[in-house]
Image: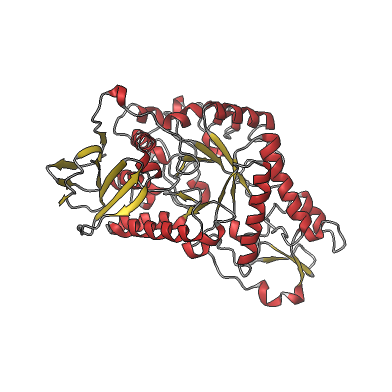
Amino acid sequence: MAGFAFAIACSPKEVAEPVNYWPQAGVTYEIFVQSFNDSDGDGIGDLNGVTEKLDYVKELGANAIWFMPIMPSPSYHKYDVTDYRAIHPDYGTMEDFKNLLDEAHKRDIKIVIDMIINHSSSEHPWFVESRKGRDNEFRDYYVWAQKDTIAESIEKKVITLDSDNIRQWHDPGNGEDFYYGFFIGGMPDLNFDNPKVREEIYDIGKFWLEEVGVDGFRLDAAKHIFPDDRPLDNHAFWKEFRAKMEAIKPDVYLVGEVYDKKEIVAPYLPGLPALFNFDFHYTLLEALNTENGMLLAKKQKEILDFYQGITPNFIDATISSNHDQPRLLNELGSDPEKYKQASAILLTMPGAPYLYYGEEIGMLGLKPDENIREPFLWDLKEKDKGRTSWIEPVYSTDATVTPLSIQKEDPNSYFNHYKGLIFMRNTHPALAIGSLELASEVYPKSVMAYFRKAQNEEIFVLHNLGEKEITVDVPKEFSNKIYQLGGAVYAEGKVKLGKNSSILLTK
């Protein structure tokens, strides 16, 4: 396993203190509570379990936590909510959550929760009432249509990036009136043409921001508030939502899931100041797997410039993986060098990076989704009191993943690699908030080369995404090495780069 090394040209006392750049460029740690840490021995992760591990999140260097859904729901993943103002009983109580919030804030860790407002559960009281008949007061909380008016649409559905559902109109059992559910029948879409629904949602936002005290929301399925043929209505809704939330909490953090290419994503920026960069994820994988060095750097520069044309104030939420994607190590052919380089690229590029729980220890997972969300391995199984057991892991087992307690002791472990990169990012303004400039020098195809500039600091970054060792010239003024990964060696204006190696140089 290739290691990393820091080369710091000063005494330990002079090493800069890490800076919290959240939300603009800080690191957010995504947690699936169900699989994270079990505090009461019932096999299911819980909020008190997360509270127990806040020092770990702090040690890793993350500035915020994004929780996948924590509200009551009939499903394990909880993306179909039955009560928008409560905590799922498996996870604990509202008091447990408020305690977690207090403890996180003491550690300067912000808390962002998943807000699922495109749809509710079909078991939500609103929908239970809505399906009772056309005259019910909650009928218009959802989108209903008579069968003969949607005959052409009932079987018609194009698969999208974020849904493989073929049927969007669902029969509740009487064969006459159908309701609209973009994802599945168990998730009926709320009707945002109804002002009452919008007011309900704004009140829910107010509850979590004002009464509970969260720092912001991750907005699920943000481009599906209205059907796909009404994008302008979607954009207008999110502007209104943002205005309502900022009236309650001026510094509220809103990050949206708009699962699409930049041209579709960008118009959401005025309403959702932070948006996930799915292009980054897919292009990172393609670049590493095809050894195409500048592919991602050029794509990222293009996206940032494009977004700048929409609004100068945006947060680019970069990801290398999340709860919907196969685990990163699987995507990279279980190659540890590629895997370490992927995180080195993520954390030396512009943006506000998200880290999915378990990636920092090299967890594994492939579809179905349950197996991308397997239990975190804190210690060897016989010693691991916090390991959850709600699911029998298929991919992340003691035979395939080294538990955290062992990795902490190994300077070359994935954990220490991630921790070191995050620390470096948080102590170098150029890496956190600096501009991105592509190198003008023509390098071999496998080389990614770019400059990061901020304040009085400039860093030259080189990654060799290839298998073969190469030697390249670097600008003479960049002679101070601050980081190296794998077989990267600097000497007299030249850098030798081994397989999947990286180096960062300053003037």
Furthest residue in direction right, as rendered: 135
Q: Position of residue 212 (x, y in %)?
A: 68, 35
In front of the other: 90 or 341: 341
Furthest residue in direction left, as rendered: 492
In front of the other: 326 or 453: 453
Furthest residue in direction front, as rendered: 456
Q: Position of residue 73 (x, y in %)?
A: 68, 45
In front of the other: 416 or 454: 454
Q: Considering the image in quadrants, where does the N terminus appear?
A: top left
**150 versus 104 height, above or below:** below
Answer whether residue 87 is visible to the viewer in this image: no
Q: Position of residue 136 (x, y in %)?
A: 86, 58
**188 versus 169 height, above or below:** above
Give the residue displayed 26% in from the left and 55% down from the top. 439
**117 versus 146 height, above or below:** above
Question: Left or right of 402: which side holds 243?
Answer: right
Answer whether residue 467 is visible to the viewer in this image: yes
| Quarter location, residue 269 | bottom right
Q: How many marks?
A: 0
Give the residue displayed 25% in from the left and 48% down from the top. 462
Give the residue displayed 29% in from the left and 33% down from the top. 412
Colour convention of the picture: secondary structure
Question: Left or right of 5: which side holds 175?
Answer: right
Q: Position of residue 384 (x, y in %)?
A: 47, 27
Q: Considering the image in quadrants, where does the C terminus appear?
A: top left
Question: Left or right of 71: which side holds 389?
Answer: left
**323 versus 161 height, above or below:** above
In front of the other: 87 or 20: 20
